[in-house]
Image: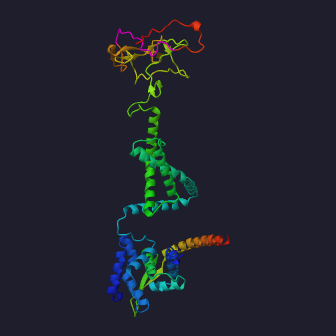
Amino acid sequence: MTTTFVTADIEEFAAQVRSHLADLGAEEIEELTGGLEADLAEELQERPAGSTLRDPAGYALELRTAAGLPLKQSKKARPFADFVTSLRQQRDDMAVSLRTNRFLSSVMDFATSLRPSWWILRAWVAYQVVVAFWLGVGGVLPESLGGWLFLLTSFTTSVQWGRGQWLRGNWMGGLVSVGNVAAVLLLVPALSVAGTFANQASAGDFYDEGETAVTGLSSGGEPVGNVFAYDAQGNLLENVQLFDQSGKPLAIDSNSFDYGCLDKECLESAILVPGQLETGATTWNIFPLQQVPTGDAVYNERTDRNEPAEGVDATQPVVPFIKVPAVFGADKSELAPDKAKAKSE
Amino acid sequence: MDATQLLKGVLDVAVLAVVEDEDGYGYDVVRRLRTGGLEEVGDASVYGTLRRLYSAGALTTYVVPSEEGPHRKYYGINDEGRTMLDSQRKVWTEFSQTMNDLLERKVRS
């Protein structure tokens, strides 16, 4: 019987071989070692007299490699390394699969030529993560020397890593792989944050989250509350209608700025009142806008704004200048009498 | 380059080819492979490959009693094994031809 040749040594050897393959699935182990004892007995019988069994670890390794199975992992838990290896394996498998298609292969060649661009982009994403997400400042590009130094360092490091330089050990390669995944995931948020900072910069420092941008007349980023026009002789004009180059009324943003002052120190406030056309329509592009004291205003639910109470007449606002210098070359003979009826205080 | 490394990927087809000629038991297949030129092939690799190919359904097996030692487990190729062998033979032929062309071109240039 075959079993009579399977000695205790052989059984012990086979058991150790199986223990060295324990990281594989039960089915794989059975495939590799099913009938191993009998085979070992046969092998010993065939080999020169006095031959002994080799080390079980080496035997197991040979079985494993001949079957094209991965080498046994270290007993030490390496979840990060395993994860990275898994990512790389999937990437390689996908690349091999795509290369079988001529069109996709061309696309891959094209994408490969774009790798340097990706190195730059991921460095910029890293910069955004640090300055915008972490430090809470930012913009598309740095505005300080320190910011530029950090960004340039990030660029240089990213490009060197892309070229396979400055990588010490597999763990750094793994770190770069994980960083690439993170950069892809953070690309859209980084673009969004950088765009937000850029918009804030263009809208001025007064801009706060929750406020709407100025939609009416503005000066230096701040809303304009009233406009005072003077003629060639420097006299204040009344009821001036302003339009832009396309005929659109140049009006104040009455939704966010519809108040004025009754005195220069603005101790008493007033509400601005829109002008009225002969058609009966009211409009916010007739300047200077007149006003009524806040105390003489009532809230109108229909228009959702404060309006002059019935019987209260609007008055001219406090003017910044009663008169300004005449325009050079203006005809002095046409010097008009002072039309300014505005109060000087 | 170590021939042992190259052998890993083609041991299946080598074993199938040997068994196609004539049924053989484990150590017999080892000997025939070595005689055929694969002198560095390991015992464990061949025995393991035979067991895998049998599990995969590419080989049949039967036991022949021996008076001197343990019974010998003989392996023979079946239809599935022949199909596998034909397919792998074709792949190998194309691959080796490509490699030969590539290497010869390198030598000439």
Q: Is residue A3 above or below residue A215?
A: below
Which residue: 46% across, 72% down?
Answer: A68
- Tell me where residue A49 appears, x and y as whole percent: 41, 92
Whether residue A269 is visible: yes
- Which of the colour schemes (rainbow, by chain, secondary structure, one colour) is used? rainbow
Residue A35 appears in the picture as rendered: no
- Residue ID at (44%, 42%): A138
In which quadrant is the N terminus of chain A drawn?
Answer: bottom left
Residue A266, position in %: x, y?
36, 18
Q: Quadrant of the C terminus of chain A?
A: top left
Q: Is residue A97 magenta?
A: no
The question of residue A318 being in magenta is answered with yes
Kindly give the residue lying farthest to the bottom in the view shown. B68
User: Front-most of A189 and B44?
Assistant: A189
Question: Quick one: B42 or B84, which is closer to the camera?
Answer: B42
In the image, taking residue B62 as reference, residue A106 lies left or right, namely right
In percent of width and height, residue B40 lies at 50, 82
Q: Residue at x 42, y 44 (%)?
A: A132
Q: Horizontal placement of A274 versus B101: left or right?
A: left
Q: Is residue A304 left or right of residue B32?
A: left
In the image, the segment drawn in magenta is: A309-324
**Image position of A335 with respect to A274: above or below:** above
Image-quadrant location for residue A27: bottom left
Is residue B22 positioned above or below A238 on the image? Answer: below
User: Residue at position x 59%, y 73% from top?
Assistant: B96
Q: How many marks?
A: 0
- Specify the principal SS of the magenta part: loop
- Pick the residue in front: A144 or A193: A144
Q: Nearer the viewer, residue A58 or A244?
A: A244
